[in-house]
Image: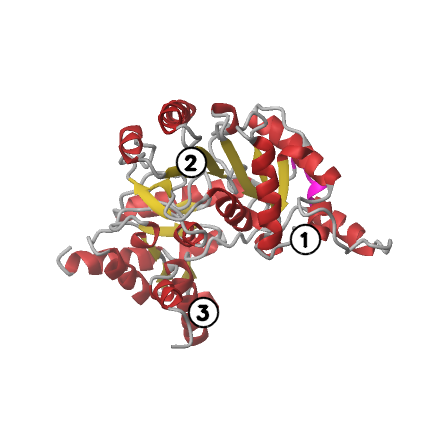
């Protein structure tokens, strides 16, 4: 066998998101891109803000010696300080550049965190639904992902979370606004979660970490706010990126921010910096680091995503679909009219509408739609959504 048994198993259950994206490529080649309605991949389609483009041109034009050379593995100190200033405002905690590590996107950041924290068989708790790659990130470093159910509106179920905490629990991973549901975990829930983790940490005699994955923090709707995780709990670690709010997912720039009151903070920061190097990232891209330092407060217009959400929700509600209206990110997670969500996604595919089955996010019976597509794509997909629903009901749903 040319690949390991573990990788063969991963390939067999690998991301439904990519499977459907690849199916979209095939259908577009067959029918033409204009005749395929692809809601499969969370790939932001808005152009980067003009300030980013202008600043990037300036940086590329520089010809100073060493401009593309190595820097400290944690990143340029002045960039870390700039990120710390921004995170301090968002999280209501005073950070310095020493509390920040620059990474190759949020995915790289999460791998650095889990490499640093996990011993073999340590457990990471995650509310369901969750971003499917978390399974692989935790497994990469010998850990085990424990799925914790949420309430019907996808908010945190604190009773279920308390019951899931065990002697091998090392961390709780939360993603808010959430992919795939768009739910935002409220401040009261985070405070109660912090209380549970504080009590459990005292019982264990070692901290249980709260890890927050927040690449969608700036993409929120209807005036919603994302409560600060760092302010809720001292043993908290924030991981984020600019992939979504600056529309640069292919540039792979992100960061880790550690609470300044973190237990054994110096050892943790040293471990994170070492992990950034030995995982092969070495450092975040130099050009993107410099770009990040000058774009604090800059973001795409989330109002465009909100308008698309409203169009999609109105259309699906009129057709008869059931869903929770997302408060952030750019995903809708409707209930499948069939218990078999893969089968229903097949009905959608027959109409050249591409969605991702909910089981890909640990939640069978739902499906995900990424509305980071032009509004005309949403409108032109309406007949397909109606036809798929009719076909499913006609099939005995």
Q: Nearer the viewer, residue 73 or 249?
A: 73
Q: Which residue is mark 2?
A: 327
Residues tagged 3 and 2 counted as in contact (Cβ below 8 A): no
Q: Secondary structure at mark 3?
A: helix
Q: Quadrant of residue 264?
A: top right
Q: CA distance from mark 1 to mark 2?
A: 32 Å
Q: Which residues are magenta?
A: 292-297
Q: Is residue 294 visible?
A: no
In the image, which is nearer the foreground, mark 3 or mark 1? 1
Query: Residue at 36% of width from left, 57% of height from top?
Result: 355
Quadrant of the frame with the N terminus: bottom left
Relative to 52, does residue 97 appear above or below in the rendering? above
Q: Which residue is mark 1?
A: 285
Q: Quadrant of residue 170?
A: top left
Query: Residue at 45% of width from left, 74% of height from top?
Result: 29
Q: CA distance from mark 3 to mark 2?
A: 30 Å
Could you classify mark 2 by the number of other residues whose Cα lies within 10 Å: few (under 14), some (14-19), or many (20 or more)?
many
Residue 229 placed where, x, y %? Answer: 49, 29
């Amino acid at each position: 066998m040319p690949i390991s048994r573990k990788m063969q198993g991963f390939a067999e259950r690998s991301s439904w998101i990519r499977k459907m994206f690849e199916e979209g490529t095939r259908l577009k080649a067959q029918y033409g891109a204009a005749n395929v309605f692809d809601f499969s991949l969370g790939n932001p389609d808005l152009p980067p803000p003009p300030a980013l483009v202008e600043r990037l041109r300036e940086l590329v034009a520089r010809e100073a010696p060493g401009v593309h050379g190595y820097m400290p593995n944690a990143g340029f100190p002045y960039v870390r300080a700039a990120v710390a200033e921004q995170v301090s405002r968002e999280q209501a905690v005073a950070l310095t550049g020493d509390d920040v590590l620059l990474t190759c996107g949020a995915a790289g950041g999460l791998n650095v965190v889990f490499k640093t924290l996990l011993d073999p068989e340590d457990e990471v708790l995650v509310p369901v639904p969750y971003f499917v790659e978390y399974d692989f990130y935790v497994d990469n470093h010998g850990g085990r992902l424990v799925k914790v159910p949420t309430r019907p509106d996808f908010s945190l179920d604190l009773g279920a979370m308390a019951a899931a905490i065990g002697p091998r629990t090392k961390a709780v991973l939360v993603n808010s606004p959430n992919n795939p549901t768009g739910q935002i975990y409220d401040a009261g829930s985070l405070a109660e979660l912090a209380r549970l983790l504080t009590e459990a940490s005292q019982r264990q005699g070692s901290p249980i970490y709260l890890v927050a994955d927040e690449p969608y923090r700036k993409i929120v709707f209807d005036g919603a706010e994302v409560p600060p995780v760092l302010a809720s709990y001292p043993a908290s670690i924030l991981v984020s990126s600019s992939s979504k709010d600056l529309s640069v997912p292919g540039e792979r720039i992100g960061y880790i921010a550690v609470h300044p009151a973190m237990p054994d903070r110096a050892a943790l920061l040293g471990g994170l910096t070492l992990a950034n190097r030995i995982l092969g990232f070495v450092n975040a891209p130099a050009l993107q680091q410099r770009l990040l330092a000058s774009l604090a407060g800059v973001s795409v217009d989330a109002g465009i995503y909100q308008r698309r959400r409203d169009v999609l929700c109105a259309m699906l509600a009129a057709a008869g679909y059931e869903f929770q209206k997302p408060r952030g990110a750019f995903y809708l997670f409707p209930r499948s009219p069939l218990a078999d969500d893969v089968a229903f996604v097949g009905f959608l595919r027959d109409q050249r509408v591409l969605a991702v089955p909910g089981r890909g996010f640990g939640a069978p019976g739902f499906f995900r739609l990424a509305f980071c597509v032009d509004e005309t794509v949403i409108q032109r997909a309406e007949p397909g959504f109606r036809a798929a629903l009719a076909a499913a009901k006609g099939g005995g749903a």
